[in-house]
Image (cartoon, grey):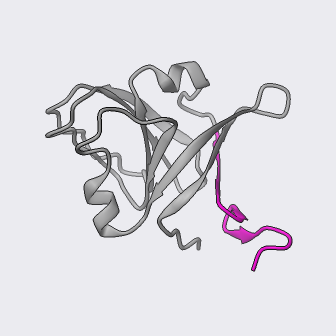
Amino acid sequence: MRTWRDGDGTLTVGGDAGAREVPLRIAASYRSRTRGLLGRDGIEGALLLTPAGSVHTFRMRFAIDVAYLDRKFTVLAVRTMEPGRLGLPRLRSRHVVEAEAGAMERWGVRPGVRLELRALGTSWGKPAPGAP
């Protein structure tokens, strides 16, 4: 099982021909998951909350897209949430990706799509060649 740490990474959507890489911020600690996007006016790229099965948008300043992922990073559902909302928990969700409203559609993130998440220096929890 992968142990995630707070930090940066990339989110890859799609196959080889149409793959799109998006900057990713990883929030794995309790403190960083609780903070999430609160107090920000926007986000460049996406935020991964792990582990997470639901989110809320209380005290947020902008609408967000939320993608619920299972443990193999397959998208279970995508929702757009306005500020001040409480999202319903997804039973098989282990991770949540948040981005500005409209971003998921532009990136091609929809139910059934498998995402590749890469933390700095790793891929799918295995150290990258040459990484310490």
Image coordinates of residue 52 in percent, x first then y, are: 36, 56
Image coordinates of residue 124 in percent, x first then y, are: 68, 61
State yes or no: residue 126 in magenta: yes
- Quadrant in the picture for the C terminus: bottom right
Q: Which of the two residues, 27 or 72, is positioned nearer the viewer here?
A: 27
Relative placement, left or right, of 95 versus 89 is right
Relative placement, left or right, of 69 versus 19 is left
Residue drawn at the location 52% of the way across and 37% of the way down = 45
> How many numbered discs sit on the rendered protein?
0
Relative placement, left or right, of 103 versus 114 is left
Q: In which quarter of the image is residue 118?
A: bottom right
Q: Which of the two residues, 19 or 23, is positioned nearer the viewer here?
A: 23
For this orientation, the residue located farthest to the bottom is 132
Q: Which of the two residues, 7 or 105, is positioned nearer the viewer here?
A: 7
Residue drawn at the location 79% of the way across and 67% of the way down = 128
Residue drawn at the location 35% of the way across and 46% of the way down = 90
State yes or no: residue 71 in magenta: no
Image coordinates of residue 96 in percent, x first then y, are: 42, 47
Q: In which quarter of the image is residue 98?
A: top left
Relative placement, left or right, of 93 versus 115 is left
Query: Bounds of the magenta span?
Result: 114-132
Task: Work out whether 132 lies above or below 56.
Answer: below
- Quadrant in the picture for the N terminus: bottom right
